């Protein structure tokens, strides 16, 4: 048996008589894997038809496997040259809404016949132009021809009944140009041909992926008299390939592998650089400059080279895809492949009792329908893939704090041993419709809460309270005092169970960064909330307080703290003995500075008062000097000024001493603050 791995990707519809669809694997990311099988007679070719939009994926993923000892000589497919490249080969271009005169102007020198009723004018195209409209007439298109008589004549194109190029090649190019435009708009099928040589028949299997609708999952959760609810899963599959799937092996894969579209179908052209040899050009004259000195010169030349990057090997393909073009081996006997064949998949019938087999598929999870499935083209089907008891219980969950009512919920633990793909879930309770929910993909052993209805028999209110922050720790370093404070906040939930039956409530309390729960122990924790499990008695009301503590730091410059504030820290229990002694010295020093500042301020006040009094006395003396008989009073005022001057001198000396003492005290304070550390 020889296998040929070719990285081509087929589109969805193949001729059913040639290679009918045998296996379909649908994924969650918009592609489907298809496998076709059939017999190929000696020298016969098989044709697979695809939509043009699918060819890139076909050319990326197609693999071929053959049995019977024959040889596959190759694969062919309908090519598609880019429209711009194809049209550039024509000697003219037809633009959007382009006037006929402008198009004909591109073909100067071409021989053209023009019919005007029963008359015919023929000649070589000289020029075509558009004459703008005016008040005297509308816009006109004109064409100038060089007639056989040698006369140049201008014709109005609107008056001509017909135009024809005398050159049949040029006339045919117009037809080819228009056909290329039509083909570019076409969405017809594209064909891939599998050719074989030799005189023996062989069995052919072609595998590929193409864009496909994702399969959808939907669940029913049934609560009954049994201790565990039953979970029923249905897969919704759409056949949009335009071809019937008859007795195909169907698999459904949960997961989203990476997939992308690579432009492989349209031919790709690269612009090549233009290069010339130096001696292809004529030598230019050289003018040599005259020498004015003799000096040694050193020169160097640099060389460059080009290196190629080795191609990166592709990752090993899944056995399901049979390989890719990078695995193609070419030998003397032709193309050969070395990947083992993927094992066949089981299928499930479309019955109420699901019997799909499931298992891991690499990092994905696969449901293999146990029996062959038939789905007509343009039809969809619902296929049961799961029906078994699941570990679960009914409870209430309060997560929407904008509502006073919790929701009825189910806590499901996936003990099925299978990955449950995400989808809508309908709940039936006691034989009646209970509500609906959305369920995320649930791996085996994982647990999830799903809410499906509002419980109007339970009401929840919230009250919020807080306490003043308490200093827990005090630290200092190089003049900065840092306090660690604890702020406590309490949210009290008041829960009233109106119904006369006990319930279990899961209360989701918001998880806030930096806060720690003090008085309650959560049953579990999510990325955004704590979950507390609270049993509710029948017809009872209870309070559930949740206290949280937030620890935060505050920093202060010790220089800016008053002695009173420092005394407050010194008297606190959060301060160590070493820290208390250091802060006490700093507080004492600040108190001395404050006392010195008060004395200095008092001396300045006395100085100002004496200065003002002295100025008043001097004004009185000036007034008395102008009055006769006041000499005695002037002498009294003079003696007072003398006393004031002595007092001012003493005050100035005291201010100087106090200022010196302040400088010394501040220097000592700065040393204490700089050395502060605890």
Image (cartoon, rainbow, N blue to C red):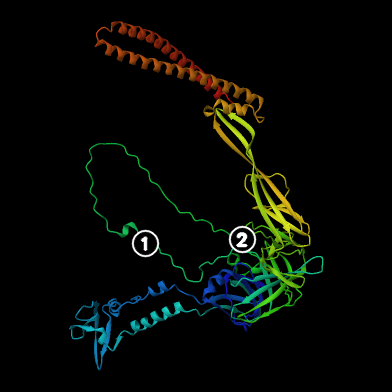
Q: Quadrant of residue 272?
A: bottom left
Quick one: SS at disc 2?
loop
In the displayed structure, 75 sits above or below 651; it is: below
User: Is residue 205 in view from this perspective?
Assistant: no
Report the quarter where the C terminus lies.
Answer: top right
The quarter in which the N terminus is drawn is bottom right
**Is 371 or 74 nearer to us in this picture?**
371
Mark 2 is surrounded, within 10 Å at the Cα level, by few (under 14), some (14 to 19) or many (20 or more) other residues, namely few
Mark linked to residue 7: none
Query: Quick one: which residue is furthest to the front in this view?
Result: 629
Q: Position of residue 141 (x, y in %)?
A: 25, 80
Which residue is at a point 25% across and 77% down the rendered structure image? 130
Q: Which residue is mark 1?
A: 274
Sort mark 1 into few (<14), some (14-19) or many (20+) by Cα contacts within 10 Å. few
Residue 561 occupies quadrant: top right
Q: CA distance from mark 2 to mark 1?
A: 38 Å
Q: Secondary structure at mark 1?
A: loop
* Residue 419 visible somewhere in the drawing: yes
Say which label, 2 or 1, has the lower sequence index.
Answer: 1
Name the spot of residue 438 as percent of width and height, x first: 66, 65
On screen, residue 372 versus residue 115, left or right, reads right
Whole-percent x, y for residue 46 in the image: 59, 80
Q: Which of 602/636 is in front? A: 636
| Residue 315 - label | 2
> Which mark is nearer the camera, 2 or 1?
2
Q: Residue reaching furthest bottom?
A: 118
For the residue pair 239 and 322, the one nearer the viewer reads as 239
């Amino acid at each position: 048996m020889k296998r040929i791995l070719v990285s081509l990707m087929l589109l969805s519809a193949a001729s059913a008589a040639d290679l009918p669809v045998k296996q379909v694997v649908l994924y969650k990311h918009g592609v489907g894997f298809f496998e076709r099988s059939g017999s190929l007679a000696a020298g016969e070719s098989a044709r697979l038809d695809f939509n043009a939009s699918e060819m890139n994926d076909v050319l990326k993923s197609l693999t071929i496997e053959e049995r019977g000892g024959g040889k596959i000589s190759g694969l062919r497919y309908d090519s598609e040259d880019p429209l711009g490249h194809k049209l550039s080969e024509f000697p003219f271009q037809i633009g959007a809404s382009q006037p006929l005169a402008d198009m004909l102007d591109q073909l100067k020198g071409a021989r053209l016949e023009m019919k005007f009723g029963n008359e015919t004018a023929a000649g070589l195209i000289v020029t075509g132009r558009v004459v703008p409209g005016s008040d005297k007439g509308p816009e006109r298109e004109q064409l100038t021809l060089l007639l056989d008589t040698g006369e140049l004549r201008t014709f109005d194109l609107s008056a001509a009944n017909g135009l024809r190029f005398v050159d049949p090649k040029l006339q045919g190019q117009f037809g080819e140009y228009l056909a290329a435009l039509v083909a570019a708009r076409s969405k017809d099928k594209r064909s891939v041909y599998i050719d074989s040589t030799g005189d023996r028949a062989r069995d052919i299997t072609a595998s590929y992926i193409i864009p496909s609708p994702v399969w959808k999952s939907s669940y029913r959760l049934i609560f009954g008299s049994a201790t565990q609810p039953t979970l029923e899963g249905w897969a919704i599959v759409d056949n949009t390939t335009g071809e019937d799937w008859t007795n195909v092996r169907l698999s459904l894969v949960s997961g989203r592998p990476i997939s992308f579209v690579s432009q492989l179908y349209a031919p790709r052209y690269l612009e090549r650089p233009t290069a010339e040899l130096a001696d292809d050009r004529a030598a230019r004259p050289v003018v040599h400059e005259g020498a004015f000195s003799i000096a040694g010169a050193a020169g160097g030349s640099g060389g460059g080279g080009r290196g190629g990057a080795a191609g990166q090997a592709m990752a090993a393909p899944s056995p399901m895809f049979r390989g890719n073009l990078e695995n193609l081996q070419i030998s003397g006997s032709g193309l050969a492949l070395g990947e083992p064949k993927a094992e066949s998949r089981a299928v499930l019938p479309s019955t109420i009792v699901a019997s799909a087999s499931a298992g891991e598929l690499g990092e994905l999870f696969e449901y293999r329908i146990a029996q062959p499935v038939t789905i007509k083209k343009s039809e969809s089907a619902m296929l049961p893939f799961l029906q078994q008891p699941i570990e679960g219980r009914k409870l209430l969950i309060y997560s929407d704090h904008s509502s006073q009512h919790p929701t009825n919920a189910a806590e499901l633990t996936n003990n099925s041993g299978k990955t449950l793909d995400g989808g809508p879930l309908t709940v039936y309770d006691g034989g009646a419709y209970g509500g609906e929910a959305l369920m995320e993909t649930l791996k085996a052993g994982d647990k999830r809460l799903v809410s499906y209805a509002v419980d109007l028999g339970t009401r929840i209110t919230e009250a919020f309270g807080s306490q003043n922050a308490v200093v827990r720790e005090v630290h200092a370093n190089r003049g900065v005092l840092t306090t660690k404070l604890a702020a406590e906040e309490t949210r009290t939930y008041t829960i009233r169970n109106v119904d006369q039956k006990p319930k279990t409530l899961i209360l989701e309390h918001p998880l806030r960064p930096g806060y720690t729960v003090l008085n309650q122990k959560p049953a579990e924790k999510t990325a955004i909330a704590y979950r507390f499990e609270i049993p509710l008695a029948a017809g009872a009301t209870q309070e559930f307080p949740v206290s949280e503590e937030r620890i935060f730091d505050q920093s202060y410059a010790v220089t800016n703290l008053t002695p009173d504030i420092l005394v407050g820290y010194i008297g606190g229990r959060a301060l160590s003995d070493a820290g208390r002694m250091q802060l006490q010295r700093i507080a004492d020093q600040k108190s001395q500075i404050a006392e010195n500042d008060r004395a200095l301020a008092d001396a300045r006040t006395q100085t100002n008062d004496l200065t003002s009094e002295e100025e008043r006395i001097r004004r009185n003396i000036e007034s008395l000097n102008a009055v006769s008989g006041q000499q005695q009073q002037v002498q009294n005022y003079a003696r007072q000024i003398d006393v004031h001057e002595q007092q001012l001198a003493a005050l100035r000396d005291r201010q100087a001493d106090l200022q010196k003492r302040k400088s010394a005290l501040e220097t000592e304070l700065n040393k204490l603050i700089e050395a502060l550390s605890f």
